[in-house]
Structures are given as structure tokens and as C-alpha cells.
Image (tube, rainbow, N blue to C red):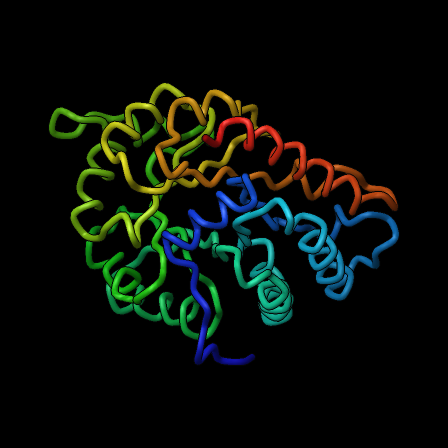
């Protein structure tokens, strides 16, 4: 385990610059699983890391961000953390490195989580759950040149259990966005909104015209890239659209790398059509 004493972070203007340069707002999700590795890889840590590295190399011309879902690595304990760290260290320096960890706890615990992902590991951003309030997010927001990506309107089946409930005359997810925006700024706050909720996302964009939105649900979950872009893009694009399974498992054969690159390029080519 090494400690990131000097980390090159990707701020908002640099992220926008990369989007313009690559004509893409693609975030590639690295939710890799041993049992789903192509047949030529051993089903072990080395196989997983080698697969991730090749996927990163194949998709880097089209990706402005990468999202590592930490649960896929944490399940293996100490070794899994090492595989995650090796994967993280291979990410290009000009891409936003997101820890999809969905942390959120009392203040001193959140402080430890923030140090883990922002100091010990070289992540630029982390997903957080806001349920416990400001003191649970504040430790993450106090880090300079880092991003907090707050869950707002998700694309899972159970999102309506709480997120669509009424609270003080507003939907709970609207209240979350409105309140969390008071704790940070468009320079260090993003929000997770699901691609399968295009109409609601349009309303969210009206609430927060300048914040970046991280959008899962395109591809395997059925979200439309065209619809979500028309609903939520702003003058700086303001979107990171994530694809995980559609890229990682575009092929299970020896051509997995070429298939992943082709899928990423396909998404990026469509994105280029929508970038002014």
C-alpha cells in the first residue's frame, strides 16, 4: 500500500477541456468480476488486473472518466483492495477517477473514509449517500480539488421507496439536491441521476444548471443516450454518462479488447453528435 502524497486531480475546467478534446463524455465503469473474465484469463487477481489494464488501454481514447465500483474489489478483502489499487494506478492522469463507494456515515467515520479514498488512494471523486446529513458529507467536501458525487435520483427498481416521497412539498430527491447544493459548489459537487428518468432529469437540470451529473443506466439498463443528453446537457455538456457491462463484456472471447474499444467508440461517436 502506498500513500498518495502528490496527486494530480482533475478539476472542472480540466474535465470540460477533456470532453471537448475527446468529443466524449463517456465514463467507463470497471465493475469487473472474476467469473465474467474472458476465457483466456485466469480467474484470479492477476487475471482481473490484466483484464482491467487492457480495457483501460482500449477505451482511454474515448473515456474522460473511469468509475471503479469498490464493492467488486472489497469482497476479496486485502487482496481485492490491492487489485483495485493496481487498477487505479493504471488510469490515465487526464481522466477523472471515481470511487463508486457510496459512503456516508457520522462525521468522524466519514473523515476516515475521505482520507482512505482521497489521501491513501488517488481517487479524484467519490459517490456518497446523503441520508445522514451535512456532517456526513462535510469531511469529503473539505478536500481541495476533489469531487463529491451525491446520490440523488437513481435508476434502480427500488428508487421510488424513498426518493419520490413528498417532503415539505417537494420530492425527497429534489430536497436532497436543493440542500446539498448549500454545502458545496459546482466546482466540487456532482449528482447521480439515472438515465432511465429523462423527464425528471430535465427538471433536475433546471434546478442545478451548472453542476455536473453522473448518469448511470445507459445501455444495459435501457436508458437512452439521446434522451438523457437532450434533457440534461448544458453549455459545458455537464454530463458524465457511465457504461460498465456494455463495454466490459462486449465480448467474452479473445476479441474482448477490440469489442470493448468498439463499444466505447460507438458511444463516443454518438456523444460527438450532441456536443456543439
Residue 199 to residue 229: above or below: above
Q: Quadrant of the C terminus?
A: top left
Q: Quadrant of the N terminus?
A: bottom right
To which quarter of the image does residue 14 belong?
bottom left
Q: Is residue 34 left or right of residue 224?
A: right
To which quarter of the image does residue 237 belong?
top left
Residue 87 to residue 258: above or below: below
Q: Position of residue 4 (x, y in %)?
A: 47, 77
Q: Which residue lies at the image location 30% right of the left edge and 67% below the top edge?
A: 143
Of all residues, the one furthest to the left in this rendering is 168
Q: Which residue lies at the image location 44% right of the left edge and 77% below the top edge?
A: 6
Residue nearest the viewer, comparing 76 with 95: 95
Q: Is residue 47 left or right of residue 225?
A: right
Q: Position of residue 13 (x, y in %)?
A: 37, 52
Q: Is residue 178 left or right of residue 272?
A: left
To which quarter of the image does residue 79 belong?
bottom right
Q: Position of residue 17 (x, y in %)?
A: 45, 49
Q: Which residue lies at the image location 41% right of the left edge and 57% below the top edge?
A: 125
Q: Position of residue 183 (x, y in %)?
A: 19, 52
Total tally of numbered discs in the picture: 0
Amino acid at each position: 500500500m502506498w500513500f498518495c502524497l502528490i496527486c494530480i486531480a482533475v478539476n472542472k475546467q480540466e474535465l470540460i477541456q477533456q470532453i471537448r478534446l475527446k468529443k466524449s463524455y463517456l465514463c467507463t465503469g470497471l465493475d469487473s468480476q472474476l467469473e465474467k473474465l474472458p476465457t483466456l484469463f485466469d480467474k484470479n487477481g492477476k487475471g482481473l488486473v490484466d483484464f482491467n489494464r487492457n480495457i483501460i488501454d482500449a477505451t482511454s481514447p474515448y473515456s474522460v472518466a473511469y468509475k471503479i465500483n469498490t464493492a467488486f474489489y472489497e469482497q476479496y478483502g486485502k487482496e481485492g483492495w490491492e487489485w483495485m489499487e493496481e487498477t487505479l494506478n493504471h488510469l490515465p492522469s487526464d481522466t477523472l477517477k471515481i470511487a463508486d463507494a457510496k459512503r456516508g456515515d457520522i462525521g468522524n467515520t466519514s473523515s476516515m473514509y475521505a482520507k482512505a479514498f482521497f489521501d491513501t488512494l488517488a481517487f479524484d471523486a467519490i459517490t456518497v449517500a446523503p441520508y445522514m446529513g451535512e456532517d456526513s458529507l462535510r469531511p469529503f467536501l473539505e478536500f481541495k480539488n476533489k469531487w463529491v458525487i451525491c446520490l440523488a435520483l437513481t435508476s434502480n427498481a427500488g428508487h421510488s421507496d424513498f426518493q419520490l416521497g413528498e417532503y415539505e412539498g417537494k420530492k425527497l430527491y429534489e430536497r436532497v439536491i436543493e440542500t446539498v447544493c448549500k454545502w458545496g459548489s459546482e466546482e466540487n459537487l456532482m449528482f447521480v441521476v439515472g438515465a432511465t428518468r429523462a423527464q425528471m432529469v430535465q427538471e433536475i437540470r433546471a434546478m442545478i444548471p451548472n453542476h455536473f451529473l453522473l448518469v448511470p443506466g445507459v445501455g444495459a439498463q435501457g436508458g437512452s443516450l439521446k434522451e438523457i443528453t437532450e434533457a440534461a446537457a448544458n453549455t459545458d455538456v455537464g454530463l458524465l454518462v457511465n457504461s460498465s457491462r456494455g463495454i466490459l463484456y462486449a465480448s467474452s472471447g479473445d476479441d474482448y479488447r477490440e469489442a470493448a474499444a468498439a463499444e466505447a467508440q460507438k458511444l463516443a461517436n454518438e456523444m460527438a453528435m450532441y456536443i456543439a
